[in-house]
């Protein structure tokens, strides 16, 4: 039987690579966007899989929209990769950050709880939840000490996922992701900023690297 996956946040770096991986494994892949008709899904186009997945228009901050999507798709697996992903921007727009991470995670988990079939859920967490560990390494057992609205939201989503797993026996887990890069990474992220500025400086088109 062909397994079916639903990716919230499919247009981002991780979502696009995950979609490609699942397609290669023989999955049917569905992915969400607030307006799928207007989204060009450039990352999926770059990976050559633009015509191999099913795009869906979903307002992830609206529980009814999320519930309807999950009920119609009836996926075997859900991947929650959506949400505001910039630590710096989270200080400027904390409300949007909390809604796009905490509210969306709750909408997904609660919608899964209300389904008749078992659906496995993966929630993308962040190493930002550990805060500043100094020279110490971070492990799964390292206490969370979030320092930014983004980290606070990710920590809340982590504990929410744990709560639904234990209270409702939903097979849900969180992956704690550290910085990871690829050719699909947007220029607004720190590694790409450094690379771009370094190239410009080497070409004589710039003198300063500003972070």
Image: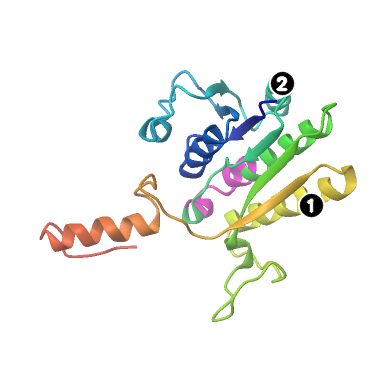
Q: Secondary structure at mark 1?
A: helix
Q: Secondary structure at mark 2?
A: helix
Mark number for residue 151? none
* Residue 27 point in image, percent of width and height: 60, 30
Residue 71 position by quadrant: top right
Magenta span: 89-100
* Residue 203 point in image, percent of width and height: 11, 59
Extreme-left residue of the structure: 204
* Residue 44 point in image, percent of width and height: 43, 32
At 51% from the left and 22% from the top, the residue drawn is: 35
* First of labels 1, 2 by sequence position: 2
Mark number for residue 68? 2
- Callout 2: few (<14), some (14-19), or many (20+) C-alpha neighbours within 10 Å? few
In front here: 107 or 89? Answer: 107
Residue 78 position by quadrant: top right
* Residue 136 point in image, percent of width and height: 59, 80
**Image quarter in which the N terminus is found:** top right
Q: Looking at the picture, does residue 79 appear above or below residue 92? A: above
Q: Is residue 72 left or right of residue 134?
A: right
In front here: 144 or 76? Answer: 76
Q: Is residue 187 left or right of residue 199?
A: right
At 31% from the left and 61% from the top, the residue drawn is: 194
Q: Is residue 144 left or right of residue 168?
A: left
- Callout 1: few (<14), some (14-19), or many (20+) C-alpha neighbours within 10 Å? some
Residue to which mark 1 is pinned? 162
């Amino acid at each position: 039987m062909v397994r079916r996956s639903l990716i919230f946040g499919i247009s981002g770096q991780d979502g696009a690579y995950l979609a490609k991986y699942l397609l290669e494994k023989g999955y049917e892949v569905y992915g969400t966007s607030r307006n799928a008709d207007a989204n060009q899904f450039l990352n999926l186009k770059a990976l050559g899989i633009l015509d191999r997945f099913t795009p869906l228009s979903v307002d992830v901050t609206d529980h009814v929209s999320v519930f309807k999507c999950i009920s119609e798709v009836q996926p075997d697996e859900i991947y929650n990769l959506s949400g505001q992903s910039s630590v710096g921007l989270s200080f400027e727009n904390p409300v949007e950050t909390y809604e796009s991470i905490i509210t969306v995670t709750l909408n997904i988990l609660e919608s899964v709880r209300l389904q008749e079939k078992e659906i496995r859920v993966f929630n993308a967490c962040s190493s930002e939840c550990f805060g500043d560990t100094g020279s110490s390494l971070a492990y799964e057992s390292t206490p969370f000490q979030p320092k930014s609205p983004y980290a606070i939201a990710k920590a809340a989503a982590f504990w929410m996922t744990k709560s639904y797993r234990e209270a409702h026996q939903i097979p849900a887990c969180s992956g704690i992701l550290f910085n990871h890069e690829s050719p699909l990474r947007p220029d607004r992220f720190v590694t790409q900023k450094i690379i771009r500025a370094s190239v410009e400086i080497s070409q004589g088109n710039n003198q300063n690297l500003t972070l």
